[in-house]
Image (cartoon, grey):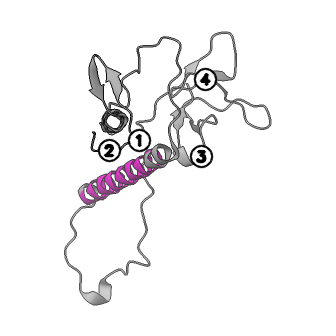
Amino acid sequence: MPVFGKCAKRILVHNFSVSPIVVMISSLLLGLVAVASVLLVSCSPYPEHANQGRRSGTKPAKPSAAQVEQAKLQAQQEEERRAEEEKQLQAQTQAQAEPTAPELPKEHAVSPSTSRKLPEPKRFDYPTAKKVPGKEGVVLSPYNNMQVSIRNEDGSLIPSHTLVSDPTYPASEKKRFFVP
């Protein structure tokens, strides 16, 4: 008599006599192994851009808000770094331009509030726009090759070699170019 009681019937599996409880326990163990293996595989790391470039008709993913914020922060840091470099360059040019004067007694010294500041030197490292053939008063922006009008509000042309801001960019980016 089996250990499982009088009610337990025996099942014939491949010419072996097996009780239903053993079959149920083995099925549960097999199911637990399957669930554990699925969970183990789902927790393994995978490359995020594994399929990128393999499909020809897919569009690139839009950047997330965190990526956009990080790009803005990097642009701001780059702008601050450029401003700091520009200040250092101005300080160097002023130091080179100012001749060393002999020390004056304190009664003849000039206070910083009354000293005259030199105007900021013009930067000539801005690109020059290209004229659009056949269209007077229109140039191609050197930053994005879009057509930009170089007319004042009254309709007159802006003179050649004038530094202007690119209207296709926001004023905070300060994209400027010279009129050809």
Rendered location of residue 25, percent (x, y): 33, 38
Q: Amino acid at mark 3?
A: Ala
Residue 167: give its label. Answer: none
Q: Which residues are magenta?
A: 71-95
Q: Residue at x 39, y 33 (%)?
A: 9
Decide if residue 176 is on the left or right side of residue 137: left
Look at label 2 and name its amino acid: Phe
Residue holding disc 3: 171
Report which residue position mark 1 lands on.
7
**Is residue 180 at all visible to an observer of this figure?**
yes
In percent of width and height, residue 152 lies at: 73, 36
111, above or below 45, in the image: below
* C-alpha separation, residue under disc 2 versus residue under disc 4: 86 Å
Judged from the image, the secondary structure of the residue bearing numbered disc 2 is: loop
Q: Tag 3's secondary structure?
A: helix
Q: Which residue is mark 2?
A: 4
Work out how far the residue at label 3 is from the one at label 4, CA to CA, in angstroms. 17 Å
Residue 139 appears in which quarter of the rendering? top right
Packing grade of label 4 (10 A; few <14, some 14-19, many >=20) is few
Image quarter (top left, top right, bottom left or bottom right) of the N terminus: top left
